[in-house]
Amino acid sequence: MAILSDTQIYKKMGYYADQRGIYRRFIREKENWKNHLERSKEFMLKCVKNKPVKKIAILGSGWLLDVPVENFRDSQYTIHLYDIYHPKPILRKFSAHPNIRFFYADITGGVTVQVYKLTRKNKKTGIKIPLSEIRCPEFTPEENVDFTVSLNILNQLDILIIDYLNNFKIYTNNELSEFRARIQASHIHSLIPGKSCLITDYIENTLNKKSLSTETRSLIHTPLPKGKNRENWKWNFDTQMNYYPNKTTIFDVVGIEL
């Protein structure tokens, strides 16, 4: 059995394709995403305003759609951008900027590679290995920073992992739900009170063609922190009914200053 590098594993598990898909959806829904992206930027700026902050880590930077780059790059801040993959157009545009640094990292703390190896072992031995054997470590930025932003990533941390596990039909829904909760809880615990904020979608609402609600489900499987300050808004994620056939998808989003 061929031994894959971490990069090959990320590709095999769909991370790179998913990131490209996000941008394609953004192009289709640009006007509908505008409020969500602006609210994310505004909340982030409020959280660091008037604080002794020089270095900021942004977890889940991606295409920088929800990052106030213009406010950061010519300011006193140094921005550390963390993602499993940084799109080439973003690297070309900002790599030379002295206030912006790129870091490649699996924000699950290595859960992705562990899961891939677990499924290989399951396939080889035919023995069901419990998901409790997967460690869910807290994520720590590669370099010390003054403030950390978890940016629309909490709900994304488990999705591709669970989708990949579902391909093998090994684990029950309860086992997968417990695993989701551990991944998300570990991420929340990694955010230091007084030095971080969390922005995440937490409720998915679907509506039919008559704009009537068809389903509402939680996207977060562990308690969210209360925090010091909160703001809520809507994200018109998919109005063209591509995400779910014949349904519009709207997310409830919360920004929490810890």
Image (spheres, rainbow, N blue to C red):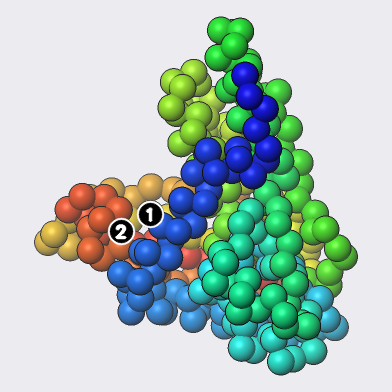
Looking at the picture, tell me which residue is in the foreground, 38 or 16.
Answer: 16
Circle 2 sits in a helix, a strand or a loop, which is it? Answer: strand
The part of the image, by quadrant, that contains residue 233 is bottom left
Q: Mark 2 points at which residue?
A: 249
Mark sitting on residue 212: none
Q: Which residue lies furthest to the front in this view?
A: 2
Residue under the point 72% across and 67% down: 102
Residue 3 is at least partly visible in this image: yes
Looking at the picture, tell me which residue is in the foreground, 31 or 249.
Answer: 31
For the C terminus, the image quarter is bottom right
Given the image, on which type of amino acid does mark 1 rest?
Glu
Q: Above or below — where is 238 with respect to 245?
A: below
Measured as percent of width and height from the top left, residue 85 is found at 61, 57
Circle 1 sits in a helix, a strand or a loop, which is it? Answer: strand
The part of the image, by quadrant, that contains residue 101 is bottom right
Distance in Å between CA atoms under marks 1 and 2? 7 Å
Return the disc, 1 or 2, that comes first in the chain's sequence: 1
Looking at the picture, tell me which residue is in the foreground, 215 or 186.
Answer: 186
Side (left or right) of 139 relative to 61? right
Q: Mark 1 points at which residue?
A: 204
Label 2 crowd bin: few (<14), some (14–19), many (20+), radius 10 Å? many
Residue under the point 83% across and 72% down: 146
Given the image, on which type of amino acid does mark 2 rest?
Thr
Measured as percent of width and height from the top left, residue 118 is found at 63, 23
Q: Residue furthest left?
A: 210
Side (left or right) of 241 relative to 59? left
Looking at the picture, tell me which residue is in the foreground, 27 or 87.
Answer: 87
For the residues labelled 1 and 2, say whether their Cβ atoms are less than 8 Å apart. yes
